[in-house]
Amino acid sequence: MFKYIVQPATEEDPTTPTDRLPLTLEMNGLDGLYAQTLSRSQHLPYFRDIMSTIALLEEPLSIAGISDLLGI
């Protein structure tokens, strides 16, 4: 979903990320998809630390940056 939302506009799809976000939020089934994905991932090492860090960041951080921040 993220890739769909943030991809730049093209001639084939002139919509912008600002146009795409509301369309994405109106899609049915996303809550279930994310809930299922997150529930399957909870056993992974550092899952809670990683998800908490991503949720609390004010600015996006790369995977390497999150790893450095958490020391993993």
Image (tube, rainbow, N blue to C red):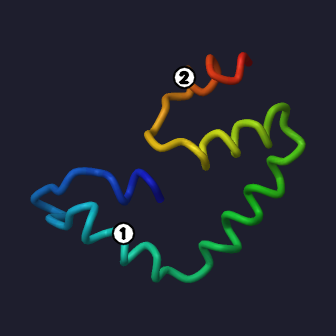
Q: Earlier in the sequence, mark 1 or mark 2?
A: 1
Q: Secondary structure at mark 1?
A: helix
Q: Is residue 6 above or below residue 23?
A: above
According to the picture, the residue beneath numbered tag 1 turns out to be: 21
* Quarter of the rendering containing residue 51: top right
* Image side of residue 48 versus residue 1, left or right: right
Decide: marks 1, 2 in contact (CB < 8 A)?
no
Q: Nearer the viewer, residue 22 or 60?
A: 60
Residue 39 is marked as none
* Quarter of the rendering containing residue 48: top right
Q: Position of residue 29 (x, y in %)?
A: 62, 78
Q: Nearer the viewer, residue 38 or 10?
A: 38
Q: Position of residue 47 (x, y in %)?
A: 79, 40
* Image side of residue 9 versus residue 64, left or right: left
Q: Secondary structure at mark 2?
A: helix
* Image side of residue 68 versus residue 60, left or right: right
According to the picture, the residue beneath numbered tag 2 turns out to be: 65
Q: Tell me which residue sits at (83%, 53%) in the image.
A: 40
Amino acid type for the residue under numbered disc 1: Leu
* Quarter of the rendering containing residue 24: bottom left
Label tally: 2
**Residue farthest along the right direction in this orientation:** 43
Q: Position of residue 19 (x, y in %)?
A: 25, 71
Location of the C terminus by quadrant is: top right
Q: Tell me which residue sits at (49%, 80%) in the image.
A: 27
